[in-house]
Image (spheres, rainbow, N blue to C red):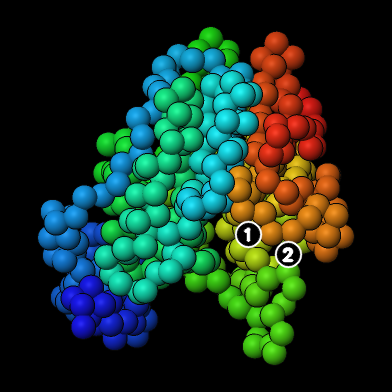
Amino acid sequence: MRRFTSLALATAAIGLATGPLLADNHGGMKGPHKHHAMMGDGHVPMYAEDLLAAYYAKLEKRVELPVAPANAAIALETTITRLAFGSCNHQSRSQHMWAQIAATNPDLFLMIGDNNYGDNGWSGDAALTSLREAYGVMAKTPELADFRASVPMMAMWDDHDYGFNDGGASFVFRSWSETIFETFWGSTDEVRSRPGVYDSRMFGADGKVTQVIMLDTRFFRSDLDRMPYQDERPPLGPYVPSSDPSKTMLGEAQWQWLEQELAKPADLRILVSSIQVITDAHDYESWENLPLERAKLYALLAGREDSGLVMLSGDRHAGGIYSDSPEAAGGEQLWELTSSSLNYSFSSTERNTAREPDPRRLTDFISEENFGLVEIDWGAKSLTLSLRGAEGEERVTRTVRW
């Protein structure tokens, strides 16, 4: 048996979990941490990730990790007037959308998750060979190389380029996945210095400052509660909301970081979540799965340093424009633009719109290939949110003021 497979099986034997292998004094289990404190009885908990650390240190010296094609730089003083984003890009499917996005001449492009499907064909090996191979395909994609040569990018992961479908903190190989991600996308020293890949950057000056906040909804996220077993798969997802206060979407450190970021002066904030925030219309992954965490997010947004705000999301292989005025956000009208997918559509707009009625979605549920565009009119203090199709055509649009 190959060494990688043997190690994967050994890891499976200890639970494929990031929790410790020793119980705490209360009979419970401590949550995952990168630096482990001693327990009350003097024992230091051992984590599955700890057992893998030496293996990955050797593996990183023996394999060449893929690196994305060179990317155009963006000066921090750049005034953002047009920002594009997208999600769900299969590395082995047509890459024609890059030219369509470039034609809109964005100042910045955000890859917000499922940037490849590295879990497809995964054998369970701890080396995450299929994920590295997916990034390798991206590294050699000429359309992506041409795009990155002219359009600056920021990136965040979702489940399929993180580890496995709907994966969260219990993915025991997450630290190696993080190394692969940060190496490929050239993450900043700040991102590399901490667990997870969340990021924030400021652009512009003199009343035209845009803050881009990229949330990591994978590395720290608690397991989701599932519906009871059914012979037939639920048509709109397998999950049910959990009122368990111990469950987290972002993890304590990222929550503290987000609060600090929202306290910084900015004129407009772009908040990226790989999964949808506002909607309650389905039972797939979304912030609805953890309603206490969503209420916490809304409260932080309500308390932010004064600024405009729009949320961007993906994941769904369909997109639209959403709005809500939740009580937890102090009644502020919030806006969310979901764009998905770049090249991996599953259905038609007509069928998906009928299948998923949603009072918070203000548009059809665009299910053919699409990317998102946010156009900023600084004089009018307005945002034009739109989805563009495979030929660059406008599919839906709304203009909102802040």
Q: Secondary structure at mark 2?
A: loop
Q: Which residue is mark 2?
A: 282
**Residue 165: % across, % down:** 51, 67
Identified at 43% across, 69% down, the residue is: 121
Q: CA distance from mark 2 to mark 1?
A: 8 Å
Looking at numbered disc 2 in the image, what kind of residue is underneath it?
Answer: His
Do residues under tags 2 and 1 come within 8 Å of each other at their CB atoms? Answer: yes
Residue 15, picture quadrant:
bottom left
**Residue 245: % across, % down:** 54, 68
Residue 237, picture quadrant:
bottom right
Mark yes or no: residue 162 visible.
no
Q: Nearer the viewer, residue 360 or 121?
A: 121
Position of residue 172 relative to residue 303, above or below, is below
Q: Badge 2: how crowded within 10 Å, few (<14), some, or many (20+)?
A: some
Identified at 60% across, 38% down, the residue is: 97
Residue 199 marker: none
Q: Which residue is mark 1?
A: 286
Mark yes or no: residue 369 visible.
yes
